[in-house]
Amino acid sequence: KLPGARGWLSAILLGITGTVASLSYSIYWVLSLPLLWLSRARVYYSDRIAISTTGNPNGLTRALLKIALGISEDIQISGQTSGLLESFDVLLPVGYQQAMVIGSFSPTTPFEDILKWDCTNPYRYWLIINSAHPLLGERLHLPKRYAHFLKLHAELDLPALIPASRNRAEFFSKLSNSYKALPLLQSTLIFGVIMGAALRGILWMIGKLSDMFDIWQLIWLHNANSFIDACILIAFSISVFLWINNYFPDLKPTNIGTDPDLGDYFATNATLPPDSRPVLLSGKLLGRSGLRNWLGQDLILQTSTGLVRLNYCSYLGPLGNILPQPTRVSNLVNQTVIVTGWFRRGVNPWIDIETISIEGDKPIRSYYPIWITILATVAALSGAYLISQVGA
C-alpha cells in the first residue's frame, strides 16, 4: 500500500504547488496592470532623449531592431520565455512579445511589412491598452521624422501615421463599430455596459415622469437598480450569442489555411482580432514546461516562418486550467505538434487553439468558445434571476 500512498501524496503535492504557482502568476499579472500606461509613457520620453542626446535617429532604429532580434533569438535558443525577461518586461526597451514576432519573421518578411499595421491600423490605440510598450512601428516613425528633419536617409521607409480619431464624430463611429475591432469578450462587455447604461437612463426617465404624472404602476423604474443590472447582464449575453459564430467560424477543409506563410498575414494592415483566419500549422511547441505553465501563459509555436503565440483555454476559462486534466498542453513542450485554430492579428498576433496534438496521438481540445458560451449563459440566468426579484 505504501507505493500507492506515495502516488496519491505526490499528486496532491503537485496539485497544491501548481495551484500556488498559477495563483502567484495571476497576482503578478494583476499587479502589473497599473504600470502599463506608465511604461508606455516613459518609452516616448526615452526615445526622444536618446535621439536628442546622440543626434543619430537611425542609430536608435537599428538599436531597437537589434534588441528585438536578440530577444527573439534568445526565446528560440532557450525554448521558452525567460522568467527574468517577462518579469522585467515593463523596464525593457522593447516588449518581449513584440520582439518575438518582429525578430523571428524578419528573415522572410521585411521590417516595413511587419510594422505597417503598427502605423496605419485605426484601432491600434484601443488594442495597445494591455501592452507595456507602444507599438514598435509607431515608435520607429519618430526617428524617421527626425532623420528627414536632419536631411538624412531614414533607416526604414514606414507609412505615415494614421491618427486615432480626427474628431468626435469619428470617435463615436469607431465606438459603435468596436465589435468589429476588439476581441469578443472585450467588445461584448463594452456593448453590455453601453446598452445597460442607455436602458438605465431611459427607465429612470420613465420612472421620474411617472412620478410627476402620478402613474404609480411605473414609479418603481427610477429606483430599480437590480433591474438595471439585469439589463447589463442580458445585453452582454445576447451580444455573445449573436457574435460568437462569426468570431469562431467552422474549421473546414475549404476555408482552412494549411501551413500558410504567417508573414503575409502580418503584412495585412487592416486585419483585426475578429477577422478570424482558420489555420492548420505544424511546428515545435516552445514554452515553460510543467507546473510553471499550467495557465498556458507561455505557449509559442515555432513554425517554418517564425514564432506565434498560442492561446489555450479550458471550459471554465483560464483559471480552469488549474483543475486536474488528463493531458496538459504544457506536457507537449519541446515536441513537434499540429495545431488547428484561428489566427488573429492584434498588437501581439496569436492563435486561438481549437486542437493541438502530436502526430498519431489524441488531440487536446481548447474550449474557449464553450467557456464564452457558459459565461454568457450564466450572465443571462443571473439577469433573469434579478428581474424575478424586482417585485419580490
Image (tube, rainbow, N blue to C red):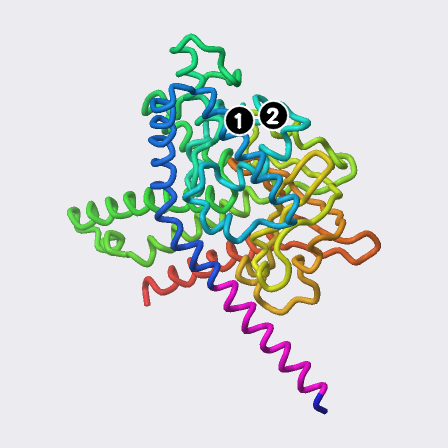
Q: Magenta segment, principal secondary structure?
A: helix
Question: Is residue 4 within the magenta segment?
Answer: yes
* Residue 117, disc: 1
Number of labelled discs?
2
Q: Using the rendered view, name the quadrant where residue 165 is placed.
A: top left
Task: Give the x, y percent position of residue 348.
Answer: 54, 38
Q: Could you say whether the residue bearing mark 2 is in a helix, strand or loop?
A: loop
User: Badge 2 is on which residue?
Assistant: 267
Residue at 57 percent across and 21 percent down: it is: 112
Residue 192 position, x and y percent, is 41, 46
Give the magenta range: 3-23
Local packing at callout 2 (Cα closer than 10 Å; few below 14, some 14-19, many 20+) is: some
Would you say the residues marked 2 and 1 are in contact, meaning their CB atoms lie under 8 Å apart?
yes
Q: Earlier in the sequence, mark 2 or mark 1?
A: 1
Image height of 33 relative to 24, above or below: above
Q: In which quarter of the image is the C terminus?
A: bottom left
Amino acid type of the residue that numbered disc 1 sits on in the rendered structure: Trp
Left or right of 78 in this view: 280: right
Report, in whole angstroms, how far the alpha carbon at label 2 lies from the one at label 1: 7 Å
